């Protein structure tokens, strides 16, 4: 017989959204049981490994950099770039809530919790034609998202002192339980022993992440008619597998919406020391690298350049003949521009080593380039293009790369510079020059030069694959993070936060994100659920 534990609130999932929900409800005087599938050492979910970028609106950092951002401007960008369906009431409502409340409920709140941001605001997802972020909004947490979950996790434990917090690691919720129409708890399984545990609660908050940790779910929900690569890497959390989503939809009347909308990345390669099967690293692609198909020819006619429209990049990569592409660059470009997203490969930011961070930004990150040269079979270096072509073919066990064709690709690009930068006529060069007008981008983007520029070598080729990341869709919720049924009515006792709720409403981002909306979306939806739960308690006691 299963043993039983009780709490005012049961939180399913120990990522950022679950931690913030638990923290805020504990501070409101409620008792909390938090159930997480991972080990105690990995507590924090995907956020523990994330880079920590946040799209925030109207912050003091923006004001200091003379960025005239407002919620009205941000909402215009959000809806236009995301192509949010105007008829999708709750996704629209959450988009508006985000731009109006990200300053007080995320930026100010985190600063109040002792967290800090790097003193520069970056400009990402500008849109291929300016339809994305019309202003810089991308704030970076000092210490990466790892510092975020560690600090908030400690605050949660302090708030739960005296036995009001129960943390259950390595437990998986297999079913939710009802009393009549109301959700009153769950059945959890200890994954070490197989023992069942019955958890009773006045309210259950789902914070189990999205769908994209399971490639079966990714392929099941892939947009109809859209090209899908034969092989992809996994950059999501493997426990975000959609099981609880389906359970809620099939047994409790909840509704999964926008399941085919995903935020994947176009340029990943296998983790040299994978944490799970298929684990991939997502690069921040070098703007100055030539993006090539499997034959070594430049993808076009519009060249692929990062920083403008990630969704479009993924579509272009997915439609390629082979499930990989190549980035061709040189050491000069790599040491200034090459980066890997996440806390693991950004130790200067993660460990808050400010002087070393500044030095690497100003003088180049040879450390990371050499590390990948040592560790990754997909990161190839050679002093000649012919030698590089041989290594590329050896990696793919093919003769796809003709050395002469690779030479011709480089010659065609370098010929643009024959008469000076003023007479170049290449869209990639134009986009680089545009990006470099913004000072933070200028620090991380090379001035355009030929790939064969003297002293710029050796050459580098990186084999890239599409890597899954986040679900933009999820369970339908209202502005109190209550799960809604097919009639738009709340399922009594059931809430959903973070990626599991499509970051609010079931799909607040629409088809595209302005980038950096995910961590704040977890915080905003979690705080909304906690407010509602605290308010219910006050009303019942009043």
Image (cartoon, rainbow, N blue to C red):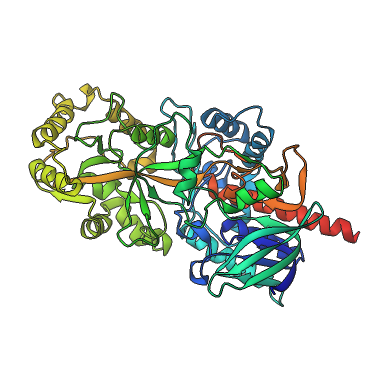
Q: Quadrant of residue 34?
A: bottom right
Name the foreground residue: 109 vs 27.
27
Relative to 491, say whether 507 is above or below: above
Q: Quadrant of residue 342?
A: bottom left
| Relative to 492, 326 lies left or right | left
Residue 387 in the image, given as x and y percentages of width and height: 9, 45
| Relative to 49, 176 lies left or right | right
Relative to 39, say whether 131 is above or below: above
- Residue at the extreme right of the image, as rendered: 542
Looking at the rendered image, the quarter that the N terminus falls into is bottom right
| Relative to 506, 261 lies left or right | left
Looking at the rendered image, the quarter that the C terminus falls into is bottom right
Name the foreground residue: 192 vs 48.
192
Relative to 208, say whether 295 is above or below: above
Residue 46 in the image, given as x and y percentages of width and height: 49, 57
- Residue at the extreme front of the image, as rendered: 1
Residue 313 in the image, given as x and y percentages of width and height: 38, 34
Residue 349 in the image, given as x and y percentages of width and height: 41, 59
Which residue appears at 56% of the width and 37% of the height?
509
Q: Is there any visible trace of residue 92 in the rendered image?
A: yes
- Residue at the extreme bottom of the image, as rendered: 162
Name the foreground residue: 139 vs 227.
227
Which residue appears at 76% of the width and 37% of the height?
487
Q: Is there any visible trace of residue 120 in the rendered image?
A: no
Q: How many marks?
A: 0
């Amino acid at each position: 017989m299963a043993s039983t534990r009780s709490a005012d609130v049961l939180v399913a999932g120990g990522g950022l959204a679950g931690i913030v929900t638990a923290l805020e409800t504990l501070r409101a005087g409620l008792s909390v049981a938090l159930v997480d599938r991972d080990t105690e050492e990995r507590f924090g979910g995907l956020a523990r490994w994330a880079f920590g970028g946040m799209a925030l609106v109207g912050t003091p950092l923006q004001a200091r950099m003379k960025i005239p951002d407002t919620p009205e401007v941000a909402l215009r960008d959000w809806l236009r770039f995301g192509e949010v369906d105007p008829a999708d009431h709750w996704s629209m409502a959450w988009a508006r809530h985000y731009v109006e409340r990200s300053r007080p409920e995320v930026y100010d709140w985190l600063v109040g919790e002792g967290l800090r941001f790097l003193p520069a605001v970056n400009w990402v997802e500008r849109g291929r034609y300016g339809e994305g972020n019309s202003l810089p909004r991308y704030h970076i947490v000092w210490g990466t998202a790892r510092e975020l979950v560690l600090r908030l996790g400690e605050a949660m434990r302090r708030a739960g002192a005296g036995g009001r917090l129960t943390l259950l690691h390595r437990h998986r919720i297999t079913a939710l339980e009802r009393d009549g129409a109301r959700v009153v708890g769950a059945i959890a399984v200890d994954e070490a022993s197989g023992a069942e545990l019955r958890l009773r609660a006045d309210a259950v908050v789902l914070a189990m992440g999205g769908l994209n940790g399971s490639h079966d779910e990714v392929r099941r929900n892939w947009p109809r008619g859209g090209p899908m690569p034969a092989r992809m890497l996994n950059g999501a959390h493997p426990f975000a597998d959609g099981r609880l989503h389906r359970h809620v939809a099939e047994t409790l009347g909840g509704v999964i919406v926008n399941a085919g909308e995903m935020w994947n990345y176009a340029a990943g390669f296998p983790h040299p020391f994978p944490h799970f099967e298929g684990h991939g690293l997502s690069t921040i692609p070098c703007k100055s690298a030539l993006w090539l198909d499997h034959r070594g020819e430049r993808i076009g006619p519009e060249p692929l350049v990062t920083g403008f429209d990630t969704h479009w990049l993924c579509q272009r990569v997915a439609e390629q003949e082979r499930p990989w592409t190549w980035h061709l660059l040189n050491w000069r470009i790599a040491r200034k521009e090459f980066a890997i997203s996440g806390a693991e490969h950004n130790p200067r930011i993660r460990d808050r080593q400010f002087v070393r961070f500044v030095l690497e930004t100003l003088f180049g990150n040879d450390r990371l380039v050499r590390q990948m040269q040592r560790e990754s079979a997909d990161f190839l270096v050679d002093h000649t293009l012919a030698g590089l072509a041989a290594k590329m073919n050896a990696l793919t066990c093919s003769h796809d790369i003709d050395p002469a064709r690779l030479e011709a690709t480089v010659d065609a690009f370098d010929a643009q510079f024959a008469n000076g930068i003023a007479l170049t006529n290449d869209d990639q060069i134009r986009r680089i020059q545009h990006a470099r007008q913004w000072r933070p981008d200028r620090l991380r983007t090379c001035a355009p030069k030929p790939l064969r520029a003297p002293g710029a070598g050796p050459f580098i080729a990186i084999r890239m694959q599409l890597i899954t990341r986040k679900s933009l869709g999820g369970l339908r919720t209202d502005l109190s993070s209550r799960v809604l049924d097919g009639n738009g009515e709340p399922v009594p006792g059931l809430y959903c936060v973070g990626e599991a709720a499509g970051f609010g409403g079931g799909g607040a981002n629409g088809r595209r994100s302005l980038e950096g909306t995910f961590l704040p979306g977890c915080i905003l939806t979690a705080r909304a659920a906690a407010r509602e739960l605290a308010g219910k308690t006050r009303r019942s006691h009043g």
